[in-house]
Amino acid sequence: MSAIASHSVQLDLPPHAAWARLSDLSLAPHYVPGLTGCQFHPGPQAGLGASRRVLRKGGQYLDESVVQWQEGTGFLLRLHKGSSDSPFPFRQASFSYALQPAGDTTRITLQMSYSLRGGKLMEWMLSKAFNKVVRQIAENLKAYYETGRTQNADLVSGK
């Protein structure tokens, strides 16, 4: 991977509570903008090898498979579409979530690593947009984890 978009936020939750929410892979539609649902592929629903399909507006979807899992601290998802590689415009893409204890609270860092089919120029052109998306996901995750209220209007309205 050649480009990275990353953002960290402080969660007003102890590490065990943050992990309880993070390790539930079905919750992503509550904080990822544009998602309308989540379906698990056959197999585990948590841990190494878990795989889900996240549904997007307009009938689009993306598959995400856990390729690394560190119990209590985080995981790495490979982003793909079916059995093929990552969808356009990505050549490869992954998304990681990492928790760090901070006293009675927890810091979470979200990171998207990617390479684009258009090469370095395309990565440079889209880097601000990807950074904005990762920041928005992190801020929505924080609000959802701390309040329990869905932060994604697309999930709430069912568009």
Image (tube, grey):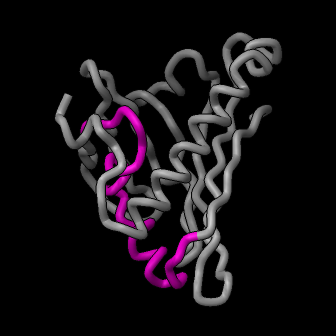
- Nearest the camera: 86 or 19? 19
Q: Residue at x 58, y 58 (%)?
A: 97
Query: Which of the 4 quarters of the picture holds residue 145?
Result: bottom left
Residue 148 place in picture, x, y as percent: 31, 66
Q: Residue at x 60, y 53 (%)?
A: 96
Q: Is residue 39 above or below residue 26?
A: above
The C terminus sits in image quarter: top left
Q: Residue furthest left?
A: 158
Residue at 68%, 82% in the rendered image:
102
Q: Is residue 66 left or right of residue 70?
A: left
**Viewer-side residue, 46 vs 97:** 97
Pinpoint residue 48: horizontal percent, then vertical percent.
47, 62
Q: Is residue 15 magenta?
A: yes
x and y percent of residue 9 in the render?
Answer: 63, 61
As for residue 23 lying within the magenta part, the answer is: yes
- Magenta residue span: 11-36
Tell me which corner region of the image, top left, top right, bottom left or bottom right, holds residue 112.
top right
Q: Position of residue 119 (x, y in %)?
A: 77, 15
Residue 66, relative to residue 9: is it above or below? Answer: above
